[in-house]
Image (spheres, rainbow, N blue to C red):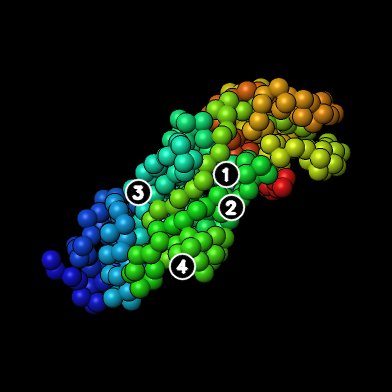
Amino acid sequence: MRTPTTAEVGRGSMQSTVVEIDGFRGQLISADHADYDIARAVWNGAIDRPPHLIARCIGTADTVAAVRFARDHNLEIAIRGGGHNVAGTAVCDDGIVIDLSAMRGVRVDPVGRRAWVQGGALWGDVDHETQAYGLATTGGIVSHTGVAGLTLGGGVGWLMRKHGLTVDNLLAVDVVTADGELLRASDHEHPDLFWALRGGGGNFGVVTSFEFGLHSVGPIVLTGPILWDATDAGEVLRFYRDFVRDAPDELGTVVRFGAAPPLPVIPADLHWRQVMMVGTCYAGPITDGEQVLRPLRTFRTPLLDLVGPTPYVGSRARSTRLSSTVGTTIGSPPTSPNSATTSST
Ligand SMILES: Cc1cc2nc3c(=O)[nH]c(=O)nc-3n(C[C@H](O)[C@H](O)[C@H](O)COP(=O)(O)OP(=O)(O)OC[C@H]3O[C@@H](n4cnc5c(N)ncnc54)[C@H](O)[C@@H]3O)c2cc1C
């Protein structure tokens, strides 16, 4: 196999095309490839960075090869998990993107209550497989966030009050270090590295596999958003502050401000109205959840109450649809609202 010279792949040589990396079996995408613009696009559509090369890995060996190649050619590296980071750090100018988006496998051991998740998986992939056994671990609020970036940053979500942050459920990782070495890190193997990975973000290596502990969840949970008019926000927030202080750990909530999205579940007369929304998920018995949530659901007559028994997987998809519109500028009417999100802990 021919390895390109530094001159061919070096920074600033956008015209050249890399054809091979030794030991790499995935897809190499450079600027002249038909998929280049799709492959460099990330969740935040405002990010427009042209990497020199995208190395789309299909396994751990590819990741090792890509890291070693980048190191040999002095290329800046960006790592792409789910591509969801708002700052667009999954893509870099003129360096190499080590793209794990084709590595979305999830394996579940229902007896040992563990899941092994590849480094490019999304939370929807994890929920889909673990919920087949009535199990779950703390992931993000929505289903299309990447497991890798969220986990390495700590990870907050619906289940965290009961089951801890995502990193509290992380048992071990397979990680390719900057010098291209493949390690397993856990409390017992390379514990310092494992400590850093549990919340320290990227830059400690490329994680190709995560091992998580799982818990019984659902599969039906009591969940959904409650909407109040934004002018009631002061009173509702004060009530909410006291309410969540004493709420049982089974209840996860998220507060959001913005415009009510034009979704079929929302009556037309509320579309684009400025609202305060409390998203809820009670991951315990439905009847207990109904009792726990009653005071919040009846406070100051909400504009809309969509709380109901829902499959845990479906609820994450619904959160995804809501969050892609409430409080964002996507498809918004002439006056776009600002948004802010806070969650109970
Ligand atoms: C709509 C929305 C909802 C969100 N909801 C939540 C939420 O509920 N809870 C929460 O905790 N966070 C949430 N976040 C934040 C989210 O966790 C981060 O943006 C996270 O970085 C996304 O992970 P990703 O894999 O998609 O990131 P990417 O954009 O792919 O990567 C971001 C960075 O993570 C690192 N990284 C990615 N993959 C790997 C890997 N395999 N190995 C090593 N490093 C890697 C790299 O440094 C990379 O630059 C949300 C973000 C958005 C936009």
Q: Earlier in the sequence, mark 3 or mark 4?
A: 3
**Pair 4/1: label in front:** 4
Amino acid under disc 4? His
Name the quadrant containing residue 232: top right
**Pair 3/2: label in front:** 2
Give residue 284's position: percent from left, percent from top.
Answer: 66, 30
**Pair 1/2: label in front:** 2
Image position of 67 (left or right of 167): left
Observer-nearest of 180 and 47: 180
Marks 2 and 1: in contact by CB < 8 Å? Answer: yes
Give the distance between the C-alpha atoms of the residues marked 3 and 2, in whole angstroms: 23 Å
Is label 3's Cβ within 8 Å of ligand 1?
A: no
Amino acid under disc 1? Thr
Q: Earlier in the sequence, mark 4 or mark 1?
A: 1
Which residue matches tag 2?
A: 168
Q: Is residue 23 visible?
A: yes
Image quarter hosting the N terminus = bottom left
